[in-house]
């Protein structure tokens, strides 16, 4: 198992945002977490990526107990994420955002910087190569020197994914990557995710609209009120009565019709 | 010991007034209003000037000082802060620093830098009590200052909880954006906030003026102690500031008997730093958190 | 009209040739009197004094840039490290009778060591709260210096040694202080070089990331706590070194050196010059050192009964933030390579 979560709980004061979640994802899988607004999906992401501390339960990455690890520790072992409300480095160019994405793959320190050491120069060379390759792959090459804050919305979302890719993650967490996108941008995004799948990347993504992930996710997990209410293949999930209840009539008309 | 507590209460009440002036502005605008100490100083001087030139009584001076305190706070907001409200926070803070330096030194030019004392506005008598083996002395001035502080606070409490504008202010300190979406005119709200803050600062200036000497630089230390009190009470919390103000006044007075008096003014800062490190929400504050 | 001129000045300020010419001018300025060209001294002790003070504040402004510029933490307590360096160095030479070189290094190390626990609150406390905490720390330092016997109380410590280091030419005023001008210049240049190199290294990238979005930085593997502490420690170290030079140049130290007014002045030097701009730090420091001296001269000429500097300074800050909040030479962050 790449990532395993056991009986995970997260409380904010009296509010139980995430309750008793058991979950696991294996290398090469694409799994989608769906659920209505406020069902604890993003909180679940924030906890497993180390941004929020766990209230109880355990998180294991490649069998190693990482329950109490902070976000920067998680990034170092290969868990990288994007955010629901885009968190780029706004005053940096597209290319420089990716350079920061390379951070966890490099190791040079202050002295390397001051003396411009061989280690730093080697890292710079390989960073440049990887960054160029990712810019091509994500279709951002033409915007290389544009400041992140000046990018169109869809490109900002793609840049966030590109930045995460720059760290060569073993598990990529995408938090509502299609939020706010127009249909054309959504299509581009889906193509990008499929291409990532072909590269063998493991992806866990959150999506609010079930329809969007039907085509790409191999497995779906449904959250409601902080609990996992269903898990399984998309086709099965779509007709699960509990899921239909959670979504009351919004996206499940096809099933009801059958 | 009891004597020190009594001495501390009058000063503590004034600290609380200054702190509330800080806290309402921070709660709503999110700015460390560095000029608040200067508003306090203006209040002290306004009171001093009307008393010495028109020989009015203390209460008239208090009202005049509150008016000028409010006016200056309003003008600072209107001229210095408002144009930058959506700008970077550091720029806003540097503006506050600049305005504070400007006002302080302008006052030193206009009113001369030396310190002066209020003329006696009424007969202050000293009462003594025998309690067991200890003798307590209480100055009627202290009692009056404490009483005035309580009246102002009671009025403020009424304003915040009973009037529409006060309620809007309270709500805005939690979420200014939401309040503006509900149709409250934000500029109007912020104007009122600065008036309230300035009036409290001006009142505190007069109250300190009758107790101690005043000078154009007096705002620096008093303003910062007010901020320390606001932090101790929990930033944004008015009742917290009241409690913390009294607490600091008393602690300062007690500490002079137990620790060297040379450290008296440092105590506020030590308490403030300790509060922020140990319990950033203060005694009664709520949490300001980054949204993920 | 003003805009192209400013642009031109900004471009000029970022050219290496400008720096080299300026350095040559400064050195010439310092040593021209030693050539005995004329009967009169061309640059008197007063001008050299101002030059030294400007250079010291350049070092301090650069060092504060680590904290305020790079990781974006507003500090109003930087004078504490400056003063601490001065006191450490003063006590090392006068009490322990160690050579000045040892005292100099020690002053930086102690300041850095103290910067570590003082930087720690910065990990938990943000924005406006950090401002008052750093301010409070500075004030507490001042109260300690005023109240301790070993630091000489409010009067401070007089009679510190001012080694000449073999560079002493002019014999006017307090003699043999050229060594300090050269030392301050070298320190400023070394620091500027370090910052220039760091900016575009992995460390500099981490600083930039933390400044712009701490949570995003952390999720890229950057440990914000580590780099914030690093910034505080670097800043404190160089401020301590500058403090040592300053105290021994003056051969006197007092609690005024740690006052909050000093800290405020240091922060405004960073802001007016432009945060993260190396030429900006020099500009801010020179401008805010020379202007008050000039105004003192104006005051004497016009027979004013007050010193107009502080009032104008306050006004300048307000106007500056309105017109050019990023500072005179402040620019966007762009990695060079």
Image: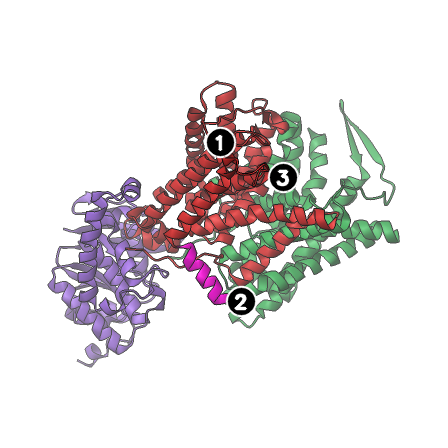
Chain colours: A purple, B green, C red
Residues packed near mark 1 inside 10 Å, few (<14), some (14 to 19) or many (20 plus): many
Q: Please, what secondary structure does the residue beneath circle 2 have?
A: helix
The numbered mark 3 sits on a residue in which chain?
A: B
Q: Of helix, strand and loop, which one carries label 1? A: helix
Which secondary structure dominates the residues rendered in magenta? helix
Q: Is residue A10 above or below residue A117?
A: below
Tag 3's secondary structure?
Answer: helix
- Judged from this view, the residue extending furthest toward the bottom is A257
Q: Is residue C9 magenta?
A: yes
Q: Which residue is mark 1?
A: C244
Q: Is residue A77 left or right of residue C39?
A: left
Chain of the residue where label 2 is placed in the rendered structure: B
Residue lying furthest front in this view?
C38
- Vertical placement of residue C24 versus A147, above or below: above
Which residue is pictured at 47% across the width and 53% down the height?
B288
Q: Are the residues tagged 2 and 3 within 8 Å (C-beta)?
A: no
Query: To which quarter of the image does residue C216 belong?
Result: bottom left
Q: CA distance from mark 2 to mark 3?
A: 33 Å
Output the chain of dot 1: C
Residue A213 image position (x, y, % from top left): 20, 69
Q: Which mark is residue B179?
A: 2
Estimate the x, y position of residue A30 in percent, counting from the top left.
16, 62
Nearer mark to the viewer, of 3 and 1: 1
Q: 10 Å neighbourhood of mark 3: few (<14), some, or many (≥20)?
A: many
Q: Which span of residues is magenta-colored?
A: C1-14
| B290 lies left or right of B210 | left
Instruction: Please tell me in which quadrant of the rendered image residue B208 appears.
Output: top right
- Image quadrant where residue B229 sits: top right
| Residue receiving disc 3 | B247
Q: Are marks 1 and 2 in contact (CB under 8 Å)?
A: no
């Amino acid at each position: 198992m790449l990532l395993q979560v056991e009986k995970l709980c997260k409380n904010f004061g009296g509010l139980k945002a995430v309750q008793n979640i058991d979950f696991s994802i294996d290398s090469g899988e694409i799994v989608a977490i769906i659920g209505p607004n406020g069902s604890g999906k993003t909180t679940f992401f924030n906890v497993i990526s180390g941004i929020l501390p766990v209230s109880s339960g355990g998180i294991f990455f490649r069998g190693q107990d990482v329950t109490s690890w902070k976000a920067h520790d998680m990034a170092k072992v290969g868990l990288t994420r994007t955010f629901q409300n885009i968190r780029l480095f706004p005053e940096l160019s597209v290319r420089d955002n990716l350079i920061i994405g390379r951070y966890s793959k490099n190791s040079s320190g202050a002295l390397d910087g001051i003396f411009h050491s061989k280690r730093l120069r080697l890292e710079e060379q390989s960073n440049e190569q990887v960054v160029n390759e990712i810019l091509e792959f994500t279709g951002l090459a033409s915007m290389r020197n544009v400041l992140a804050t000046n990018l169109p919305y869809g490109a900002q979302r793609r840049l966030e994914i590109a930045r995460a890719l720059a760290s060569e993650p073993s598990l990529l967490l995408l938090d509502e990557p299609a939020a706010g996108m127009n249909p054309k941008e959504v299509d581009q995004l889906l193509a990008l995710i499929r291409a990532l799948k072909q590269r063998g990347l493991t992806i866990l993504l959150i999506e609010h609209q079930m329809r969007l992930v039907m085509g790409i996710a191999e497995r779906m997990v449904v959250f409601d009120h902080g609990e996992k209410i269903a898990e399984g293949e998309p086709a099965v999930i779509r007709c699960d009565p509990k899921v239909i209840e959670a979504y009351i009539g919004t996206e499940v008309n096809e099933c009801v019709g059958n | 010991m009891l004597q020190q507590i009594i001495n501390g209460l009058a000063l503590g009440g004034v600290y609380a007034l200054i702190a509330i002036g800080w806290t309402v502005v921070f709660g709503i605008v999110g700015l460390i209003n560095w000029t608040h100490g200067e508003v306090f100083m203006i209040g002290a001087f306004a009171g001093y000037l009307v008393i010495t030139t028109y020989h009015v009584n203390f209460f008239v001076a208090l009202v005049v000082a509150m008016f000028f305190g409010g006016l200056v706070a309003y003008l600072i907001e209107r001229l210095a802060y408002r144009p930058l409200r959506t700008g970077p926070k550091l720029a806003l803070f540097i503006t506050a620093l600049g305005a504070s330096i400007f006002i302080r030194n302008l006052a030193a030019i206009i009113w001369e830098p030396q310190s002066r004392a209020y003329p006696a506005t009424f007969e202050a008598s000293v009462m003594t009590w025998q309690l067991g083996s200890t003798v307590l002395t209480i100055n009627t001035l202290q009692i009056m200052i404490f009483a005035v502080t309580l009246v102002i606070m009671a009025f403020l409490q009424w304003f915040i909880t009973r009037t529409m504008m006060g309620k809007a202010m309270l709500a805005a300190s939690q979420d200014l954006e939401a309040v503006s979406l509900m149709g409250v005119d934000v500029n109007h709200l912020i104007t009122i906030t600065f008036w309230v803050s300035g009036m409290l600062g001006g009142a505190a200036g007069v109250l300190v003026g009758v107790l101690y000497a005043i000078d154009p630089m007096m705002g620096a230390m008093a303003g910062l102690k007010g901020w320390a009190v606001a932090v101790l009470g929990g930033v944004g919390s008015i009742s917290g500031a009241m409690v913390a103000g009294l607490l600091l006044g008393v602690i300062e007075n007690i500490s002079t008997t137990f620790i060297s008096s040379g450290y008296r003014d440092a105590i506020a800062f030590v308490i403030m730093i300790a509060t922020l490190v140990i319990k950033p929400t203060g005694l009664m504050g709520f949490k300001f958190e980054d949204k993920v | 009209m003003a805009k192209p001129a400013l642009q031109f000045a900004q471009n000029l300020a970022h050219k290496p040739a400008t720096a080299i010419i300026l350095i040559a001018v400064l050195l010439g300025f310092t040593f021209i009197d030693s050539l005995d060209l004329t009967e009169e001294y061309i640059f008197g002790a007063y001008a050299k004094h101002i030059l030294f003070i400007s250079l010291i504040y350049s070092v301090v402004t650069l060092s504060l840039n680590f904290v305020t510029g790079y990781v974006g933490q507003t500090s109003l307590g930087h004078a504490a490290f400056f003063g601490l360096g001065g006191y450490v160095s003063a006590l090392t030479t006068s009490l322990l009778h160690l050579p000045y070189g040892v005292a100099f290094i020690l002053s930086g190390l102690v300041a850095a060591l103290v910067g570590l626990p003082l930087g720690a609150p910065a990990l938990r406390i943000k924005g406006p709260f950090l401002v008052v905490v750093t301010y409070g720390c500075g004030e507490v330092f001042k109260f300690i210096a005023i109240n301790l016997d070993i630091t000489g109380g409010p009067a401070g410590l007089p009679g510190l040694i001012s080694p000449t280091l073999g560079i002493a030419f002019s014999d006017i005023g307090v003699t043999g202080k050229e060594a300090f001008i050269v030392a301050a210049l070298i320190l400023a240049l070394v620091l500027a070089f370090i910052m220039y190199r760091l900016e575009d290294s992995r460390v500099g990238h981490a600083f930039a990331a933390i400044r712009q979005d701490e949570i995003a930085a952390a999720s890229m593997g950057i440990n914000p706590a580590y780099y914030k502490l690093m910034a505080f420690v670097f800043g404190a170290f160089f401020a301590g070194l500058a403090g040592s030079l300053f105290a021994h140049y003056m051969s006197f130290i007092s609690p005024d050196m740690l006052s909050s007014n000093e800290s405020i002045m240091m922060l405004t030097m960073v802001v007016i010059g432009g945060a993260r701009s190396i030429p900006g730090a020099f500009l801010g420091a020179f401008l805010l050192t020379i202007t008050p001296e000039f105004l003192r001269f104006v005051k004497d000429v016009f027979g004013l009964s007050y010193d107009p500097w502080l009032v104008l300074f306050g006004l300048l800050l307000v106007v500056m933030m309105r017109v050019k909040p990023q500072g005179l030479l402040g620019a966007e962050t762009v990695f060079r390579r």
